[in-house]
Structure formats: structure tokens, C-alpha cells
Image: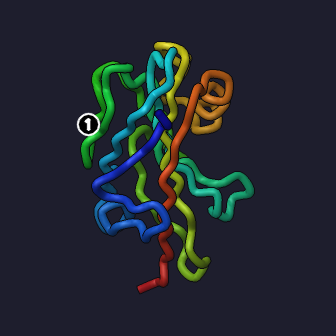
Amino acid sequence: MTFTLTSNDLTDGGVLPDAQVQAKGNTSPHLAWSGAPEGTKSFAITCFDPDAPTGSGFWHWTVANIPADVSEIPTGGPVPKGAVEGRTDYGEPGFGGAAPPPGHGPHRYVFTAFAVDVDELPVTPEDSGAKYGFNLHFHTLAKASITATYENKGD
């Protein structure tokens, strides 16, 4: 079975709904995953904008240490007991919706679920997306993504 990520709120290749835009809802989307490979001990979720004009993208959400018996997060959360949300590039833990600069063209928002080979990654709510990504690099068994776009037209 292939590891897959689905959502009641997002469509792969579609436009990010207003609910996931910072100024219009700022709500984390529903995400569900299935087909985790053998040896999966926990899950993680990230949302990353590779098109942000920073030289290093923008982390909108990092969640790690989701227990292995959990297979979805509802719209707006909460994240499961035991999970830890990291600091977004907005400077606080939790979900931070899309907010690209006006006139910068469409940005991609890549929501990724990771099947992880350890119960807990050594991350905290104060840690950056880069630290979450570094730890995930060494402990990912499988990953699946949904990418949606959003453009701030300044209206």
C-alpha cells in the first residue's frame, strides 16, 4: 500500500481556500493519511511555502510526534495529545495561514505528512521549521504531499 495524504479542505493542484489564508480564516486544514509503511512509530505534518521571497522559503506549520494510532487532524485542530507544534516563520507555534506579498504571483503551499521511524523527534514548540525538517530528514520512512496555490492580488 502507498502512503497517501488526503483532505476535506484542500485539493492537490487547486487554490488554497480562504480558511487557510491568514487574513481570511487562518485555520489549519483537515488532513488524513493512510498506508503507513511497516515500522512507522509516529507521524509529522508540515506546511511550507517554497516561493516566499526569503531565500529559504517560509514555514507555515510543523507538527511532530503525532502518535502512530492517529490518522487525521480535523479542520482547525487540535493536534493530537502528545504531538508538538513548532514555531512558524511568523514566530509562534501553531498554524499560520498564507500571506504572500501582493503582486508577487501565486505561491505554492506544500502540506506534507511524514511516516516517522521513532516515537518522538527531539523538537520543541520553540524550534524552527528547519530543525523539524533536519530531524525528519533522518527519520522519514515515507511522505505524501498536497500542494495548493494562493496569490495575494491586493484586493
The residue lying at 39 percent from left, 41 percent from top is 94
Q: Count numbered badges in the picture.
A: 1
- Which residue is situated farthest in the front direction here? 1
Q: Position of residue 2 (x, y in %)?
A: 49, 37
Which residue is labeled 1 in the image? 78
Q: Position of residue 46 (x, y in %)?
A: 50, 42
Report which quarter residue 23 is drawn in: bottom left
The residue lying at 64 percent from left, 63 percent from top is 51
Answer with left or right where residue 104 lies relative to residue 118: right
Q: Position of residue 107 (x, y in %)?
A: 57, 68
Give 35 or 76, whichever is nearer the viewer.
35
The residue lying at 39 percent from left, 25 percent from top is 66
- Local SS, label 1: loop
The three-letter amino acid code for the residue at tag 1 is Pro
- Which residue is situated farthest in the right direction here? 55
Q: In this picture, is 10 found above or below 82?
A: below
Q: Position of residue 25 (x, y in %)?
A: 29, 62
Answer with left or right where residue 32 lies relative to residue 93: left
- Image quadrant in which the C terminus is located: bottom left
Q: In this picture, is 101 found above or below 82?
A: below
Q: Residues within 10 Å of mark 1 (few under 14, many from 20)?
A: few
Colour scheme of this structure image?
rainbow
Give 103 or 49, whichever is nearer the viewer.
49
The residue lying at 46 percent from left, 61 percent from top is 12
